[in-house]
Image (cartoon, helix red, strand yellow):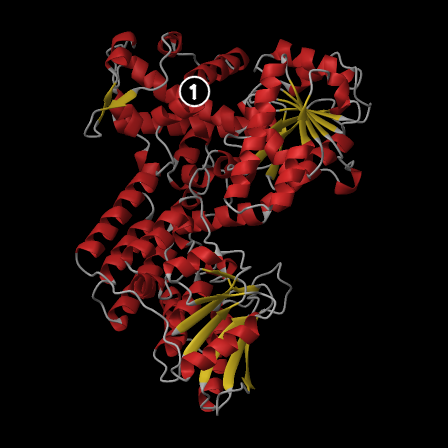
Amino acid sequence: MISAAEAKDAFPDEVVTHATTRLVSVPGLDKPVALITIDNGHDHNRPSTFGPQSLVSLNAALDEAFAAEPAAIAVTGKPFVFAVGADLSGVEQIARRDLAVQIAQTGHDVFRRLTESAIPTFAFVNGAAMGGGLELALSCHYRTLADNVAAIALPEVFLGLFPGWGGTQLLPNLVGPDAAVTVIIENALNQNKMLKPAQALELGITDELFGSADFLEQSLAWLVRVVRGEHTPARPEIDRGSGWDAAIGRAKAVVEGKTKGASPGANKAVELLELARNADLDTGYAAETEALADVLMTDTLRAGLYSFNLVNKRAKRPAGAPDRSLARKVGKVGIVGAGLMASQLALLFVRRLKVPVVLTDIDQDRIDQGVSSVHDEVGKLLSKGRISPDEANRLKALVTGSLDKADFADADFVIEAVFEELGVKRQVFAEVEQHVSAEAVLATNTSSLSVTQMAAGLRHPERVVGFHFFNPVAVLPLLEIVRGERTDDTTLATAFAVGKQLRKSCVLVKDAPAFVVNRLLTRFLGEVLATVDEGTPFDVADSALDPLGLPMSPMTLLQLVGPPVALHVAETMHEAFPDRFGVSDNLRRFVEAGKNAVWTWDEQGNQRLDPEVAELWRQDDRPSTAEQVRERALSALAEEVRIMLDEGVVAEAQDIDLCLILGAGWPFWLGGITPYLDRSGVSEKVNGKPFLAPGVASVPSA
């Protein structure tokens, strides 16, 4: 176990989570309860974490607790927070494997004292419990959970790591292997999905759920019943045979489907879950320690931490955003259009801003359908218990439709979601400007067109801003906020304020064709399709990028975006940059034929090329290998990213990575794109230099 001096030397800047022990007399017990509270001394906006000094403090608190020979030992957290795991800022500084081993071993040694205690141990989980915090709770004999806890998860695989302080060994033996696969692997790789308290109870992660108002009192009263033998929490019988086989099979399928085997942390998680079937804690914890030390020394893990910092720090302080004090208040929203995107926007605006939202379109039927769609979605939220009946009624009342744009007269923010054609959008804004005040913001959800050109000819072009959402609007957190040549700071500040209210991560983008995400994805997809045009088999081209572990293959991306949309954006980009963006004649024929997918599947689920696509796609006889396709696509991305940075499309490479992570679902453990291009040598080869400074998203020198 690491010493106090070694702990301070290892992480000198650690925000220490102190553990304090107090003896609490509880009616019904002859001896007191040793209650250990873990608290980093900050408010709940900075959750408690565990670095080496924090582990030393917890170990000392346990010494004090055991010395008192209490009736029970209980661990709880500061208000609203139990603990959220390892101190990731310190993890980034670990440059030696022996230090990684020492810290991993210390976590096991400290937490294991609770597991192997002859005195009953309890975790009173009063707030967020993630990663090592949840592993601390799992190390106790019994657990209670407050019903208002906002986040319960083991998110390590999302970062390219795995639960390394007992999680892979304790959880499957508590709740069964299938539930453990769901929490450790499936949820983590599903955009870091969190458990709700009721779900944690259903899975068996917690023994009881209590109200937050008197959570500690109820937990202590329940502890008394357990200690006195009046209540024994139920534990499921664990299937170590075919059930475990099936769970590991599912884990492997999820990891392959989500990462293509490219994430070392996910692969290790599967191995360790299989080991937990029959291993004792000595064996299991030793394997976790060695595997953790290995993964901590990988660039993949550094890329995951880099992504974590982008999403949790940079995204909260958007580079280049004007002073927030310039923002105007938004009391009413107008939406031009009533189709699928418009109705998604209406639902988001009304839920988050809780102000009147008016939709308009070219005929009453479309308007009625759009409003009805929003009302239906509100009804679904009500049926799932996510909102109350009163709130459902209020939200429905706030969403209305009108054929007359004069109903936008008192709107402070109007966004268009109409056909992606510049002339149509310019006409829409010209009509809206006849009715709204001079201060009202006019926002466009365009995915590729010029905001500046859209504002040209208006009386107040300074109030036009790009507000580019990603589909599905409710899921993807990115919002590209586009500043046109005439957009003023007040408009921009209002846009950022609204984006924050919508709970989106906003990135300031220059008014350049297709902005960031669509520009890069179009270049990427265009290069892959070009290799198919040249004669590369579809399956070779489609699987060529698998080593990156991207969320979807190029052909799946084409299907998701929609071939007509992909063709339109490709044509827009070709017009702007004909030397780098081509337009496939085959893609045109594909769209004209009404096809939306390259692949079909037989009754056994086997994928094959659609015979109609094979017939219409005219290929040359210059095929590429998978490696050549991959090199070509990555080289094109490296070139395009460098050009975008030189053009000032965003402030820094970190903003491009943030956009791809949040807008295109690129894996955390990939680090966006620039860390991958750097560590694979593509940046140096194409541009003569890396995008990021040495040591950023890579293992630092010892």
Q: How many other residues sit within 10 Å of disc 1, few (<14), some (14-19) or many (≥20)?
A: some
Residue 619 position, x and y percent, is: 27, 10
Identify the residue at horizontal 51%, vertical 78% (top origin): 221
| In the foreground, 261 or 476 | 476
Quarter assignment of residue 540: top left
Q: Is residue 309 left or right of residue 546?
A: right
Q: Is residue 458 left or right of residue 155?
A: right
Q: How many marks are shown on the rendered structure?
A: 1
Quarter assignment of residue 190: top left
Identify the residue at horizontal 46%, vertical 65% (top origin): 133
**Kind of element beneath mark 1:** loop
Residue 468 position, x and y percent, is: 59, 28
| In the foreground, 109 or 559 | 559
Quarter assignment of residue 320: top right
Q: Does residue 679 sit above or below 461 in this rendering?
A: below
Residue 170 position, x and y percent, is: 33, 66
* Quarter of the picture holding the C terminus: bottom left
Q: Is residue 415 left or right of residue 691?
A: right
| In the foreground, 341 or 491 | 341
Identify the residue at horizontal 39%, vertical 26% (top origin): 557
**Residue 444 appears anywhere in the view:** yes
**Residue 1 appears anywhere in the view:** no
* Quarter of the picture holding the N terminus: bottom left
Residue 504 position, x and y percent, is: 59, 39
Q: Does residue 154 sit above or below 350 in this rendering?
A: below
Q: Amino acid at mark 1?
A: Gly
Q: Which residue bears the numbered disc 1? A: 562
In this view, the residue farthest toward the left is 241
